[in-house]
Amino acid sequence: MKPSLISIAMCCLSAWAQADSLKISCGAVGQELTLCKQAVAQWSKKTGHEVQVVATPNDSNDRLALYQQILGSGSDKIDVLQIDVVWPGILASHLADLKPLTAGREQQHFAGIVANNTVGGRLVAMPWFTDAGLLYYRKDLLAKYRQAVPDTWAALTATARKIQDGERAAGNDKMWGYVWQGRAYEGLSCDALEWLVSHHGGTILDSSGKSAVNNPQAARALTMAAGWVGSISPKAVLNYGEEEARGVFQAGNAVFMRNWPYAWALAQKADSAVQGRVGVVALPKGGADGRHAATLGGWQLAVSRYAKNPRLAADLVLYLTSSEVQKQRALSASYNPTIGALYSDPDILRANPFIGELYHSMSNAVARPSAISGRRYNQLSNQFWNAVHDVLAGKSDAATALQQLDVSLKRMAPAGFRAGK
């Protein structure tokens, strides 16, 4: 994050700090901030305790930088933090152990996510919502051009080109075939990991923590993606995050979009240009011999170990991650619960027709190598997304970029990455 942004945020947090209230940071992608404020207000009404909701940067890298500065100084300016699924290992030393305060309620949640949030035997965060990458498509346009939903990346490329060209010839010069997250940030690591795994190109690190990116399948995957830029994807995709991609798709100017489940509810709103015309499926395979791959995402709620009232903060976390609140969030904004029982809830299934299938796809979702790289994950991911971005931007070919990345990762951890080191 730029120093000026951090300084502004720290200044605002200082102004908000009050000993007799809690401060919670929430994301603001899609409807996150609105829903957070609503649920916090419900808890405040029930308990009589004031809570101040702090908006933090949408960009996950900037948000992590802000958290690290605040926590690194031992500040109590934020009591409850919304943290990414890959941050427990990075921030664990600054987070409170919630296990003595949960009365076992973490057992209602997906065991894999609870395990992800447990560092050194300490439960440092509670699961709030979970994600997996999805392919959104325009049902009406596929029907108009008599095209099947693509099962492989090659089929997606061909279909996107056909419909894009047809729509432009009909007068929509803003139409693009495929939009996704191409900015050099964590979102690109998610997209690129899906490309690699779908081509059997590895998961950045192998199970022993050693670099596994330098292989022909990975190079083929990145070469494929680079071919989209300026062809079926705008050159501006190199600066797209989730919201930029959603903006283009929801305005009716893209055939396909890669995004997280939150985009479904927004696409169905009355002011959406594509309301009722969107379908959702698993992301394509790398080829006939490839596999469907979706990066596991999601966010957690953690309590700062510097909070003045950690028990009260933990009570807020347990309320916000409860079945009641997770159902509200699923119904109003298609945020995926971390409580398995909710995936068979008839109300949720009516509101989110694809969520039942998503339950099964999540069991096969690909985790980023954060568990094995521990505190060094952000450094590793930064190296990965920058290498991928160089390929997408035409600054390097895939084979060269991956070879250089392999050297860099080995230099960073000569014996391989190890969790917590």
Image (cartoon, grey):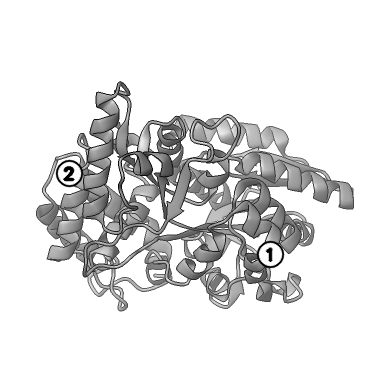
Across and down, in percent, residue 59 comes to 46, 41
Rounded to the nearest angstrom, the CA distance separating label 2 from label 1 is 42 Å
Relative to 391, 308 lies left or right? right
319 or 370: nearer the eye? Answer: 319
Please give the name of the residue rendered at 40% of the width and 45% of the height, measured from the top-left corner. 137
Please give the name of the residue rendered at 75% of the width and 70% of the height, measured from the top-left corner. 101
Q: Earlier in the sequence, mark 2 or mark 1?
A: 2
Relative to 283, 226 lies left or right? left
The quadrant of the image that shows the N terminus is top left
Q: Amino acid at mark 1?
A: Asp
> Is any part of residue 337 visible from this angle?
yes
Residue that sits furthest to the top in the current view = 171
Q: Secondary structure at mark 2?
A: loop
User: Residue 197 falls in which quadrant of the image?
Assistant: bottom left
Across and down, in percent, residue 354 comes to 53, 58
Find residue 227 and name its label.
Answer: 2
Please give the name of the residue rendered at 12% of the width and 45% of the height, measured from the top-left corner. 396
Relative to 98, 273 lies left or right? left
Q: Nearer the viewer, mark 2 or mark 1?
A: 1
Find disc 1 in the rendering and name its residue. 345
